[in-house]
Image (tube, rainbow, N blue to C red):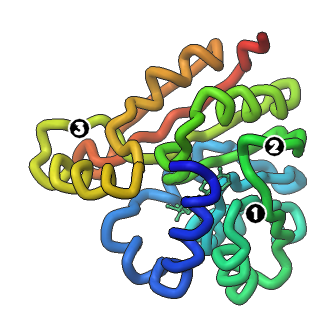
């Protein structure tokens, strides 16, 4: 999906996002735990949306140490209602310019048409010894529900079955991937960016 279309879609969905997405977006806590957050660290949530990762991130660090980054201001406004002390930054991952040590991106990379630029920006902004956690759908073509959702999401240009963990290996030397929620979800821990 192109960024301007994503912005329109999520502006429209911002008021129904929380109750609709709880039905099929899982394991945010598990993904956040892979960041190995320490008390004094700052964390960047890329495509933070309305803040599904926040209750889990706040188990490790204070709200002042979190940056919620998203393309859609309406989604960030919803996040701010729930977490007023968290800093929000409206922007496009394709133009990311926030150096980070720990970053997470949940259920967002599948939306972005230009995934190569997105991953290049994510690697470029990573500091020495940083960790990037990718969290999203896995490539599970055997599950009939998955097949149905994939068809549905294609209508919005959401690339559910893109196989991002495989792609991540072109951008990081060290990628460890696990599946969860009966193969529905993937979490990849990425370290040591390949900088070109
Ligand atoms: C499916 S929501 C995921 C939100 C949250 N991470 C979660 O797991 O519930 C995708 C979010 O990505 C944002 N988004 C889409 N394309 C983006 C881009 N190019 N840069 C930054 N955010 C983007 C949308 O505005 C939306 O809030």
Note whether 9 is above or below 170 in the view shown.
below
Disc on the earlier residue, 2 or 3: 2
Q: Which callout, 2 or 1, points to the residue nearer the camera?
A: 2
Residue 26: quarter of image: bottom left
| Residue located 36% across and 47% down the image | 185
Q: Position of residue 175 (x, y in %)?
A: 55, 22
Q: How many marks?
A: 3
Give the crowd class for mark 1: few <14, some 14-19, many >=20 residues within 10 Å.
many
Q: Give the labeled residue for mark 3.
A: 140
Residue 177 shows in the view? yes
Residue 107 lies, in percent from the top left, at 49, 53
Where disc 1 sits, the SS reads: strand
Marks 2 and 3, Cα distance to the nearest angstrom?
Answer: 30 Å
The answer to whether any part of residue 59 appears in the image is no
Whether residue 45 sits left or right of residue 167 in the image: it is right
Q: Which mark is residue 96?
A: 2
Please tell me whether mark 3 sits on a helix, a strand or a loop: loop
Is the CB of mark 2 within 8 Å of ligand 1? Answer: yes
**Quarter of the picture for ligand 1?**
bottom right
Which residue is nearer to you in this view: 113 or 129?
113
Name which residue lies at 53% across and 40% down: 113
Q: Could you tell me how far apart the alpha carbons at marks 3 and 1 are, in whole angstroms?
A: 29 Å
In-image side of 186 versus 148 (left or right): right
Pointer 3 or 1: first along the chain: 1
Return the x and y of residue 48 as percentages of the image width and height: 65, 62
Question: Residue 112: image x %, image y %?
Answer: 55, 44
Label 2 neighbourhood size at 10 Å, few (<14), some (14-19), many (20+)? some
Q: Secondary structure at mark 2?
A: loop
Looking at the image, tell me whether mark 2 or mark 1 is earlier in sequence order.
Answer: 1
| Residue designated by label 1 | 68
């Amino acid at each position: 999906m192109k960024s301007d279309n994503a912005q329109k879609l999520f502006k429209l969905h911002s008021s129904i996002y929380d109750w609709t997405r709880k039905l099929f977006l899982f394991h945010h806590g598990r993904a956040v735990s892979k960041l190995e957050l320490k008390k004094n660290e700052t964390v960047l949530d890329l495509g933070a949306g309305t803040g599904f990762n926040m209750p889990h991130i706040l188990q490790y660090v204070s709200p002042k140490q979190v940056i919620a980054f998203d393309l859609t201001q309406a989604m960030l406004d919803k996040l701010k209602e729930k977490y007023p002390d968290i800093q929000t930054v409206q922007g496009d991952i394709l133009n990311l310019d926030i150096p980070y040590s720990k970053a997470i991106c949940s259920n967002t990379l599948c939306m972005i048409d230009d995934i190569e630029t997105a991953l290049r920006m994510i690697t470029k902004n990573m500091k020495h010894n940083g960790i990037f956690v990718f969290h999203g759908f896995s490539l599970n073509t055997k599950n009939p529900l998955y097949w149905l959702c994939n068809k549905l999401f294609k209508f919005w240009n959401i690339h559910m079955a893109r196989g991002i963990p495989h792609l991540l290996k072109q951008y990081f030397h060290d990628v460890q991937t696990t599946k969860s929620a009966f193969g529905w979800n993937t979490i990849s821990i990425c370290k040591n960016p390949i900088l070109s």
